[in-house]
C-alpha cells in the first residue's frame, strides 16, 4: 500500500510539472488570440491599398480650350489712324462661344484706346455687346479680360476700337492683301467711351490691311 501511494504521488507531481510548462509557453488561448489578430490587420491593409488605388485612378479634368477670333499675326507694318473715329471690322463667330478677353497690337507711347464688340444689323455694326473701359496706349499688346464672361451666339459681329489723344500712336497691320477680302465700317466719333449704338458708317470691302485686333473665346 505504501508503495502504491508513492507511485501515485510521483505521477501527480509529473502531471503538475507538465501543466506548469504548458502554461509558461503561452497556452492555447494566447496562440489563438495572436492568430485572430493577424487576419484583421491584413484586411485593414487591403482597404488602405484600395483607397490609394482609387485616388490614383481619379480623372483629372482637362484645361478649358480657348480660341482666337480675329487677326493676331504681326507683319512689322504700321498705319496711323486719326483720332475722332471708331473703327470696326466684320467678324464671323462660327459657333456659340463665351467671350473672355479683347486684344490689340499697337505702336506708340501715349494716349488711350477702348476695344469693343458690336452686334450686326442690316449688314452693319449696331448695338454694343461688350467693351473695355479706356486703356492706356502702349508700345505692344493692349488687352482687357472681360469682368463677366459674355455668351455669344453664332453669327456675324463687328470687332473694333476707338482711340484718342494718341499723338503719334499707330496700329500694327496684318498682311497688305488679305484673302478673303476684309470688310470694315468706320465712323466719326468724338466721345471718350465706346458708342452703345454704332454711328452711321461707311462699308469698305477689300481694305489694304486690318488692325491686329482679336478676341479670345471659349467654345
Image: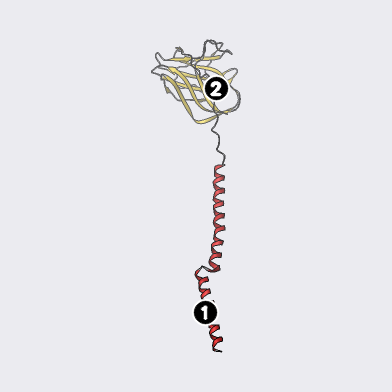
Vertical comparison of 201 with 6: above or below: above
Q: Nearer the viewer, residue 184 or 197?
A: 184
- How many labels sit on residues? 2
- Return the x and y of residue 91 as percentages of the image width and height: 56, 20
- Residue drawn at the location 42% of the way across and 17% of the way down: 164
**Closer-to-camera residue (17/218):** 17
Q: Position of residue 213 (x, y in %)?
A: 50, 19
Reading the image, the residue beneath label 1 is 13
Q: Is residue 215 visible?
A: yes
Give the alpha-carbon distance from disc 2 to disc 1, as whole Å: 103 Å
Label 2 or label 1, whichever comes before in sequence order = 1
Q: Residues within 10 Å of mark 2 (few under 14, many from 20)?
A: some
* Residue at the limit of the structure toward the bottom, as seen here: 1
Residue 212 x, y percent position in the rendering: 49, 17
- Classify the position of the C terminus by image quarter: top right
- Residue ID at (55%, 22%): 69
Residue 192 visible at all: no
SS for dot 1: helix
Residue 42: x and y in percent read 56, 55
Question: Left or right of 33: which side holds 166?
Answer: left
**29 lies above or below 177:** below
Residue underneath mark 2: 69
Amino acid at each position: 500500500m505504501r508503495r502504491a501511494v508513492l507511485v501515485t504521488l510521483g505521477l501527480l507531481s509529473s502531471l503538475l510539472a507538465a501543466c506548469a510548462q504548458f502554461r509558461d509557453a503561452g497556452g492555447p488561448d494566447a496562440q489563438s488570440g495572436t492568430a485572430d489578430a493577424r487576419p484583421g490587420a491584413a484586411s485593414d491593409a487591403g482597404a488602405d491599398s484600395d483607397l490609394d488605388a482609387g485616388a490614383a485612378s481619379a480623372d483629372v479634368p482637362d484645361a478649358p480650350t480657348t480660341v482666337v477670333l480675329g487677326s493676331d499675326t504681326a507683319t512689322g507694318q504700321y498705319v496711323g489712324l486719326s483720332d475722332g473715329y471708331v473703327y470696326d471690322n466684320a467678324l464671323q463667330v462660327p459657333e456659340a462661344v463665351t467671350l473672355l478677353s479683347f486684344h490689340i497690337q499697337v505702336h506708340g507711347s501715349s494716349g488711350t484706346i477702348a476695344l469693343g464688340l458690336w452686334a450686326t444689323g442690316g449688314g452693319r455694326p449696331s448695338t454694343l455687346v461688350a467693351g473695355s473701359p479706356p486703356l492706356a496706349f502702349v508700345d505692344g499688346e493692349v488687352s482687357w479680360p472681360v469682368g463677366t464672361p459674355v455668351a455669344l451666339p453664332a453669327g456675324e459681329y463687328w470687332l473694333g476700337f476707338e482711340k484718342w489723344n494718341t499723338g503719334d500712336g499707330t496700329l500694327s497691320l496684318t498682311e497688305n492683301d488679305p484673302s478673303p477680302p476684309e470688310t470694315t465700317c468706320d465712323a466719326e466719333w468724338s466721345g471718350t467711351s465706346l458708342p452703345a449704338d454704332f454711328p452711321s458708317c461707311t462699308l469698305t470691302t477689300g481694305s489694304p490691311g486690318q488692325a491686329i485686333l482679336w478676341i479670345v473665346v471659349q467654345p
